Image: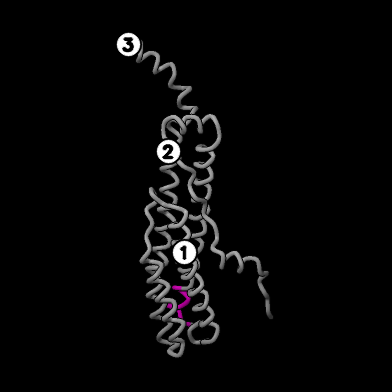
Amino acid sequence: MKNRILVLALMLMPFMVGCGIQSLPQSKNATEAALAEVNNQYKRRADLIPNLVNVVKGYAKHEEATLTAVTEARAKATSMQIDPSKVTPEQLAKFQQAQSGLSQALGRLMVVSEQYPQLKADQNFRDLQAQLEGTENRITIARQRYIETINAFNNQVSVPPTSWTNAIMYHFEKMPQWDMTPEEKASAEKAPEVKF
């Protein structure tokens, strides 16, 4: 009897693999890993910011308000952690909003460099600026990969035949997709102004 069940299970295995019995959990794991990488890149940025603030402080003592805003935005962004395995749309929106606030504060800090020529010429500042630019690019790539993995997972959860397997065995819900905050959307709708 056991041999018959084993043979039947082996015969059904190719059909079960194609129905999402393996790919659904793998896809869920991939989305969690992709969100963890987004968090990793945000942490890298947060770790760099104290160095940036200290370099700017030496040159731009009159820009205390900007430096304080960056420090506060960093503290707010790093105080919020999300668990990739239990993320909700509300948690994701709050996390995204905190990171967006930090991005805006960093943008204002970079404007400070335009007002202080000696700061722009400083090697430490240029190095940190290059590090931040590289970090922002890494964050963009990590978010892009997260968006792609969420899309693949949601397709498996909602498109047959894998959705049938999900309905019978796993009961996974579609995951919230990464999106811009309302402030980011309003900013993105404006065309950049170029001045010479």
Secondary structure that dominates the magenta span: helix
Mark 2 → mark 3, Cα distance in angstroms? 29 Å
Q: Residue at x 37, y 71 (%)?
A: 75
Q: Position of residue 121 (x, y in %)?
A: 50, 82
Q: Secondary structure at mark 2?
A: helix
Q: Is residue 125 magenta?
A: yes
| Residue where numbered disc 2 is placed | 26
Assess disc 1: are there few (<14), some (14-19) or many (≥20) residues with their C-alpha within 10 Å of its C-alpha. some
Assess disc 3: are there few (<14), some (14-19) or many (≥20) residues with their C-alpha within 10 Å of its C-alpha. few
Seen from the viewer's position, the closer of residues 122 and 37 is 37
Q: Residue at x 46, y 27 (%)?
A: 17
Q: Position of residue 35 (x, y in %)?
A: 43, 52
Determine whether label 1 and label 3 are within 8 Å by CB. Answer: no
Seen from the viewer's position, the closer of residues 57 and 14 is 14
* Placement of 196 over or under 185, stated as above or below: below
Seen from the viewer's position, the closer of residues 71 and 93 is 93
Image quadrant in which the C terminus is located? bottom right
Determine the residue located farthest toward the bottom in the rendered image. Answer: 62
Q: Secondary structure at mark 3?
A: helix
Q: Amino acid at mark 3?
A: Asn
Q: From which residue to which does the magenta span run?
A: 122-128
Q: Position of residue 191 (x, y in %)?
A: 68, 69
Determine whether label 2 and label 3 are within 8 Å by CB. Answer: no
Name the mark on residue 3.
3
Q: Secondary structure at mark 1?
A: helix
Q: Position of residue 36 (x, y in %)?
A: 40, 53
Q: Residue at x 40, y 58 (%)?
A: 40
Q: Earlier in the sequence, mark 2 or mark 3?
A: 3
Determine whether label 2 and label 1 are within 8 Å by CB. Answer: no
* Placement of 118 over or under 130, stated as above or below: below
| Residue where numbered disc 1 is placed | 135
Q: Earlier in the sequence, mark 2 or mark 1?
A: 2
